[in-house]
Image (spheres, grey):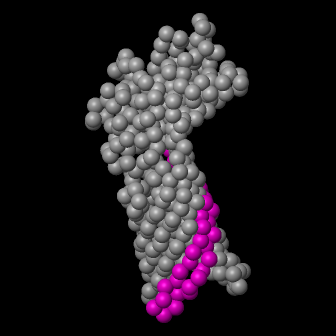
């Protein structure tokens, strides 16, 4: 397999950003692209922990015992959105001679939807455990036929350290491990033909930036009930670390992605595992940065790894109804990266 890493990496980025109606003649430097991706990944290393925090911030600091006359547990749904800085993504757009009005707003809202459930602890052990999972399939919520996807899931453990009594609020502390993945994709039908060959996409092939993160947080939650138990005021903080990956991906199946080299044309899925691995190493060597590449039978992805520190604050109010329903309304702030967010959730809780 004799493929120059420059033209394939050009495809990985260009297929997303080039408007098919314009044509493309600019020669891109893979090292410059890697630098711009590095800047964008700095922003995402702060934004992803914030997005992953949606869900499981229930108004109650502790929901009670699981084994009781009335077992304490709950299940519900929540939705929210957080801002993310995309000005560095617009810098990448400039590599392809896009006009300013073709790019994203500097602050863009990214939404998430989650299902939460929580079960209480035991009589002598005042803890509870929560689980969340949410998935937003690729939907075209941005202009230029760009679709957005998000997956969020996580698990937390909280221990009540102070009970709600008199003027004293309930306080719990805990830990949460959460995962956030997603990306932006655009369908493209473009052929690039450098001297050494060409890469052609068609059909349902998509290209765009992708991201994923593992987030590990220490959590503090404070809640005070009024007009028992109809109204709750709550707030809290998260301090943690995020292991993030930000990159670009071209994906397609069947004949949607074709590679021509040495006078022969092959579908990406026809390459052997060894050829795919060798090709990924060539791309890494050519990028001249800390990028890593993964090539599979369905996609080619270039990644940059980052470690982010997050400190997020949240606060809100909850309405507690007689039939066990609770409505939480929350606002959030990332005080390190200056991002904002909000969420609303409804659940049934015993």
Percent from the top left, x then y, of residue 164?
Answer: 53, 87
- Magenta-colored segment: predominant secondary structure: strand
Q: Is residue 347 visible?
A: no
Q: 136 and 290: which one is in front?
A: 290
Task: Name the residue rendered at 50%, 19% in the picture.
Answer: 7
Task: Name the residue rendered at 45%, 59% in the picture.
Answer: 80
Percent from the top left, x then y, of residue 88?
Answer: 37, 41
Percent from the top left, x then y, of residue 246?
Answer: 51, 42
Q: Is residue 340 visible?
A: yes
Q: For this view, does 149 lie left or right of residue 265? A: left
Residue furthest out toward the top: 263
Q: 58 and 306: which one is in front?
A: 306
Whether residue 32 is in magenta: the answer is no
Whether residue 152 is in magenta: the answer is yes
Q: Please state, as top left, top right, bottom left or bottom right, where the N terminus lies in the image.
A: top right
Per the rendered image, the range of residues in magenta is 149-177
Relative vertical location of residue 140 with respect to residue 170 in this rendering, above or below: above
Q: Quadrant of residue 56?
A: bottom right
Relative vertical location of residue 333 with respect to residue 93 in this rendering, above or below: below
Q: 94 and 264: which one is in front?
A: 94
């Amino acid at each position: 397999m004799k493929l120059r890493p420059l033209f394939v990496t050009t495809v990985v980025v260009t297929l997303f950003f080039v408007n098919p109606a314009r044509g493309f003649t600019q020669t891109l430097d893979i090292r410059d692209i890697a630098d711009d991706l590095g800047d964008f990944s700095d922003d995402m290393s702060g934004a992803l922990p914030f997005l992953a925090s949606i869900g499981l911030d229930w108004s109650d600091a502790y929901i009670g015992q699981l084994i009781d006359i009335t077992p304490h547990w709950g299940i519900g749904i929540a939705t929210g959105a957080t801002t993310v800085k995309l000005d560095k993504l617009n810098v990448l757009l400039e590599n392809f001679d896009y006009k300013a009005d073709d790019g994203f707003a500097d602050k863009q809202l990214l939404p998430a939807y989650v299902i939460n459930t929580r079960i209480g602890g035991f009589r002598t052990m005042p803890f509870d455990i929560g689980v969340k999972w949410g998935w937003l399939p690729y939907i075209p919520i941005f202009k230029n036929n760009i679709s957005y996807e998000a997956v969020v899931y996580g698990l937390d453990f909280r221990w009540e350290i102070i009970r709600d009594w008199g003027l004293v609020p309930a306080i719990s502390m805990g830990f949460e491990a959460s995962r956030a993945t997603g990306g932006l994709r655009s369908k493209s039908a473009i052929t690039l033909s450098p001297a050494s060959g060409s890469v052609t996409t068609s059909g349902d092939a998509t290209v765009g930036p992708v991201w994923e993160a593992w987030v590990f947080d220490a959590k503090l939650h404070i809640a005070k009930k009024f007009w028992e138990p109809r109204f709750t005021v709550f707030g809290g903080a998260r301090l943690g670390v995020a292991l993030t990956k930000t990159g670009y991906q071209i994906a397609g199946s069947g004949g949607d992605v074709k590679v021509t080299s040495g006078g022969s044309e092959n579908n990406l899925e026809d390459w052997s595992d060894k050829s795919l691995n060798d090709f990924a190493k060539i791309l890494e060597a050519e990028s001249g940065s800390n990028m890593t590449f993964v090539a599979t039978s369905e996609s080619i992805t270039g990644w940059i790894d980052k470690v982010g520190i997050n400190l997020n604050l949240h606060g809100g109010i909850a309405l507690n109804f007689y039939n066990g329903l609770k409505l939480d309304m929350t606002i959030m702030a990332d005080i390190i990266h200056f991002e904002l967010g909000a969420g609303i959730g409804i659940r049934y809780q015993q």
